[in-house]
Amino acid sequence: MAQLKPGIRIQSAVCATEVMVVKAPEGDAAVRCGGAPMQEIGAEKSGGAPDPAAADGTQIGKRYVDEADTIELLCTKPGAGSLALGDEPLILKEAKPLPSSD
């Protein structure tokens, strides 16, 4: 895939997942969903089903990041495929705990 920029929306080629890029790494990024490269919104889907090894699904409104925190994706439409940067699966970003109000 081409270079990603914050604000760009991309979709899975094999499921309904759509995400918006919140934070992008330098240079080209190979973002995958369901084992297949993601594509621009509106591109024709290749069809098929997500790879069973990459079919944990995505959840709407959740943010996904890599271990090094170089990329952050916001799920705008859920699907059956799971997200990855190259071969590294993206993980669900946890909410920051609020300070107690005692």
Image (cartoon, rainbow, N blue to C red):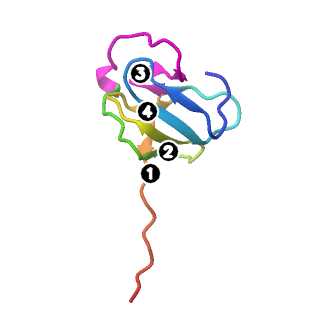
Pointer 1 local density, CA inside 10 Å: few below 14, some 14–19, many at least 20: some
Question: Between disc 1 and disc 3, whose residue precedes?
Answer: 3
Residue at far right of view = 27
- What residue lies at 61% left-to-right and 21% top-to-bottom? 1
Q: Residues within 10 Å of mark 4 (few under 14, many from 20)?
A: many
Q: Amino acid at mark 3?
A: Gly
Q: Which residue is mark 4?
A: 83
Q: Using the image as rendered, state which of residue 54 and residue 79 is in the foreground.
A: 79
Q: Are marks 3 and 4 in contact (CB under 8 Å)?
A: no
Dot 4 falls on a residue whose secondary structure is strand
Q: What residue appears at the point 37 percent right and 22 percent down from the top-left corner?
A: 15
Q: Earlier in the sequence, mark 3 or mark 4?
A: 3
**In the rendering, at what x and y percent does residue 52 appear?**
29, 22
Q: Position of residue 16 (x, y in %)?
A: 38, 25
Marks 2 and 4, how far apart in space? Answer: 9 Å
In percent of width and height, residue 97 lies at 42, 69
Give the labeled residue for mark 3: 35
Looking at the rendered structure, the kind of residue marked 1 is Lys
Cβ atoms at labels 1 and 3 below 8 Å apart? no
Mark 1 / mark 4, whichever is N-terminal: 4
- Tell me, yes or no, if residue 86 can be seen here: no
Q: Are marks 1 and 2 in contact (CB under 8 Å)?
A: yes
Upstream in sequence: badge 2 or badge 4: 2
Q: Which residue is mark 2?
A: 65
Does the magenta-highlighted stretch encompass residue 39?
Answer: yes
The Cα–Cα distance between marks 3 and 2, rounded to whole angstroms, is: 17 Å
Q: Which residue is mark 1?
A: 93
N-terminal label among 3 and 2: 3
Q: Quarter of the image for the C terminus: give it.
A: bottom left
